[in-house]
Image (cartoon, grey):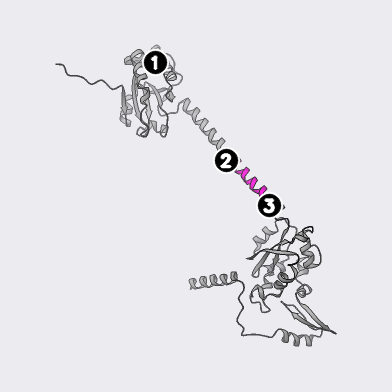
Amino acid sequence: MAKKVAPTALQTEVINDEEWAKVLTRKVVDVYSDWSGPCTGMVSILKKIKMEIGGDALSYATANCDRVTDLKRFQGKSEPIWMFIHERRMINLMFGAHCPQFIQMLTTELDRIQNGGEHEFSIDVSEKSPEEVTRLKIQEEAKIAKEIAKKSRKEAETKARYEAEMLHLTTSLCNETCLLLFPWIFKDEEGRRRDKRMSPQYVELIEEILPENYTVEQEIRKRLNEDLLRQMLDESTYSFSETAKQLLFDGKCMFIRLKIIEGRKNLEVHNYLCSILFNEPTLPETDECLNEECYEVFVCTVKKVGCEAFLGFAGIGPYHVSENPEKAIEESKLYFPDVTAVEETQSDDEEKLEELEEHQDDTAAT
């Protein structure tokens, strides 16, 4: 009894460069990846074409693009790839499993081989076919279009945020303003920091001047520098003198956000604040604000007899009590005794935290 012979496989399996070199004759190669596998849906079509048209002149193979160097460029593709090879060169390439297109392309290339016709192209199998070049161009254009759309969307979002912020500034904040207090307001006559509740200027401002005109929405203590000051004045015509800057940078300033009360909303919020503070609707020049007379704005005269003035409270100097220099010296000693052994008064909680951090830094350094 004759021994049965196993049928020859329809497709030669190629999984390395050595096997790939052996099939570069007359082949239609199904290029696949490890994760997807060969295209099994086209097997019946391959058999039919081989029996009806190709015969021995046509052979098939499957090649793993993850393991064959010439096919590395096809890694990650999710659709079938059909490479038509003749005499070790690629003569056509098709993506997908569209049967009519596949049959048309295969019969055309077989006819050209059998009749000595000229192929549309004949290139090394490692090079990109015209179809690949076209696809890459489309992908690149799609990528660029996506990046442009992303950039446009980001610009639109940025513009929307800006417009929302401007709307907020022109509506919600139209009745608000900000007041900047110099660091010296929170120091005593000896230059030591003190709590804001111990500052006559701050107390007068919060308890007497502002309540009938503004509500305090927020207080922030912050140390300024040239960069921050430049940002603050970016769209302002106001400028600080060098003397004012020295005082401004000598410790932490206080920013107070104020909101004008309901009964005064018909007034211009900024000009009105200047009027109640400086008796004029605009900010005075900083040099004028820092001279002796301006400092004495914070000195309250409760009684005056002849050439002598008696003080109810005083913040910082320069100050005078009497026009007679000798009397002024005696009175100044009375009102401002020379205290040498008084423990320094702490400022606000934020100042205490800053001192604690500085102490920790010094301890770590030693």
Can see residue 283? no
Q: Residue furthest front?
A: 263
Instruction: Examine the residues drawn in magenta and state their main secondary structure.
Output: helix
Of 93 and 313, nearer the camera is: 313
Indicate the amino acid at tag 1. Answer: Leu
Classify residue 189 by image quadrant: bottom right
- Label 2 – label 1 distance at C-alpha: 47 Å
Q: Pick whichever of labels 2 and 3 is earlier in the sequence.
A: 2
Q: How many marks?
A: 3
Is the residue under label 3 in contact with that under label 2 (CB below 8 Å)? no
Q: Is residue 37 above or below residue 249?
A: above
Judged by depth in the image, the label closer to the viewer, 1 or 3, is: 3
| Residue occupied by mark 1 | 110
* Residue type, mark 3 in image: His
Residue at which label 3 appears = 168
Q: Residue furthest right?
A: 306
Q: Examine the structure image and report whether residue 158 is included in the region drawn in magenta.
A: yes
Task: Give the quadrant of residue 42.
Answer: top left
Q: Which residue is mark 2?
A: 150
Amino acid under disc 2: Lys
Q: Nearer the viewer, residue 350 or 54?
A: 350
- Magenta part of the chain: 152-169
Q: Earlier in the sequence, mark 2 or mark 1?
A: 1
Under circle 3, the secondary element is helix
Residue 48 horizontal/vertical position (percent): 35, 16
Q: Quadrant of residue 147?
A: top right
Q: Position of residue 304 (x, y in %)?
A: 82, 82
Q: Position of residue 358 (x, y in %)?
A: 54, 71
Q: Residue at x 52, y 34 (%)?
A: 140
